[in-house]
């Protein structure tokens, strides 16, 4: 049996699959149940400094090839997250990546300062949500100087927590943004966040289906784009990557890893294959490795011949 263990920024993961941010709520019991379903690690839903109300329903559209969502990053705020992280720590079954989000630099700093004191393994900085533009303007991940400024500010207060920047695909050259973050001190990247926003219209009503009108696109249709961007960022920066975007099978996960990802995030896949998609994908990775003489899955990272 192939060894599926991977090390990411100093933390050991039992297998490369991690729950992507935004899929389940911020509670220790849901994180633990996802680990029981085979996930090698957990990323929290994005945590705000204060309570943040999401968008009204409907918030999600699902189709065979893609999903669209505009949940609006609802969250109970930092104090609640601190309680849940403490609860998870009691009999912690797998590494925890805390995703944080803010409307401005000061908010990011305040949350990161607190996170530096908590038993989390990695800090993921969500500067790429496409659905809060009305509130906050263009995402920081879409402007290189903003992306670098937030990275620097967070790194200054994050103590010994590795800082991973969640990148947006909705840019002309993602490597430019990644390089700016690397100059700002980023330790790694998670990419891609959702594509878009997109628009889906109800013909009879002549109206958008989502209450927010537009939403971020995820699911199998965006995977080839995500794999290409992971490869571009891996080549440009050499920093370790959590590859996310449409991964639903072991083959998808292996593609992400060959492109340069160390860990593979899954979100929409839970809709397509159920919560135990993590175990299914890990088993599929293992089968492929056994068939192809790969003893340690880490060996395949970044090995695509281009
Ligand atoms: C939302 C947040 C995201 O980061 C994303 O990619 C899509 C949707 C949201 O909560 O609306």
Image: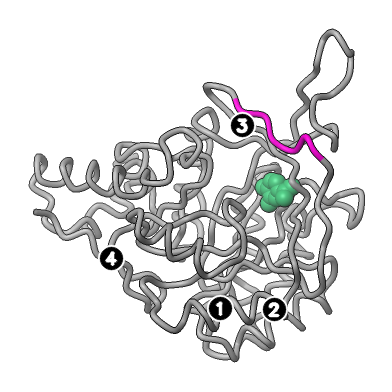
Q: CA distance from mark 2 to mark 3?
A: 33 Å
| Residue at numbered disc 3 | 67
x 50%, y 57%: residue: 236
Q: Residues within 10 Å of mark 1 (few under 14, many from 20)?
A: many
Please say if 77 is above or below 53. Answer: below
Q: Which mark is residue 85?
A: 1
Counting other residues with Cα less than 10 Å from the Cα at mark 2, is it few (<14), some (14-19), or many (20 or more)?
many
Label placed on residue 14: 4
Q: Quadrant of the N terminus?
A: bottom left
In this view, the residue in front, 93 or 154, is 93
What residue lies at 88% left-to-right and 19% top-to-bottom? 207
Q: Which residues are magenta?
A: 57-62
Q: Are marks 1 and 2 in contact (CB under 8 Å)?
A: no
Vertical position of residue 172 compared to residue 204: above or below: below
Q: Residues within 10 Å of mark 4 (few under 14, many from 20)?
A: some
Local packing at callout 3 (Cα closer than 10 Å; few below 14, some 14-19, many 20+) is: many
Q: Which residue is mark 2?
A: 152
Choose the circle earlier in sequence order: 3 or 4.
4
């Amino acid at each position: 049996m192939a060894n599926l263990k991977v090390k990411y920024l100093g933390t050991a993961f039992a297998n490369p699959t991690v729950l992507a941010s935004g899929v389940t709520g911020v509670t220790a019991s849901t994180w633990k149940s996802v680990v029981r379903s085979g996930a090698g690690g957990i990323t929290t839903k994005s945590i705000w400094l204060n309570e943040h109300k999401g968008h009204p329903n409907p918030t999600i559209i699902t189709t065979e090839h893609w999903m669209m969502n505009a949940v609006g990053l609802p969250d109970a705020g930092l104090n609640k997250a601190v309680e849940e992280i403490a609860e998870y720590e009691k009999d912690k079954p797998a590494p925890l990546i805390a995703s944080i989000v803010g409307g401005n630099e000061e908010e990011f700093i305040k949350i990161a300062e607190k996170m530096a004191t908590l038993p989390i393994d990695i800090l993921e900085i969500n500067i790429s949500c496409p659905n809060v533009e009305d509130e906050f303007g263009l995402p920081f991940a879409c402007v290189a100087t903003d992306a670098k400024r937030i990275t620097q500010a967070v790194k200054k207060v994050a103590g010994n927590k590795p800082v991973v920047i969640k990148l947006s695909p909705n840019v002309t050259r993602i490597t430019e943004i990644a390089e700016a973050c690397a100059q700002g001190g980023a330790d790694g990247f998670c990419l891609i966040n959702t594509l878009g926003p997109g628009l889906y219209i109800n013909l009879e009503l002549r109206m958008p289906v989502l209450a927010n009108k537009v939403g971020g696109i995820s699911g199998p249709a965006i995977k080839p784009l995500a794999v290409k961007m992971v490869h571009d960022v891996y080549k440009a920066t050499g920093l370790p990557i959590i590859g996310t975007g449409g991964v639903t099978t072991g083959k998808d996960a292996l593609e992400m890893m060959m492109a340069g990802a160390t860990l593979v995030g899954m979100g929409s896949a839970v809709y397509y294959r159920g919560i135990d998609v993590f175990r299914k994908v890990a088993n599929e990775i293992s089968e492929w490795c056994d068939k192809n003489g790969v003893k340690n899955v880490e060996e395949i990272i970044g090995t695509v011949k281009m």
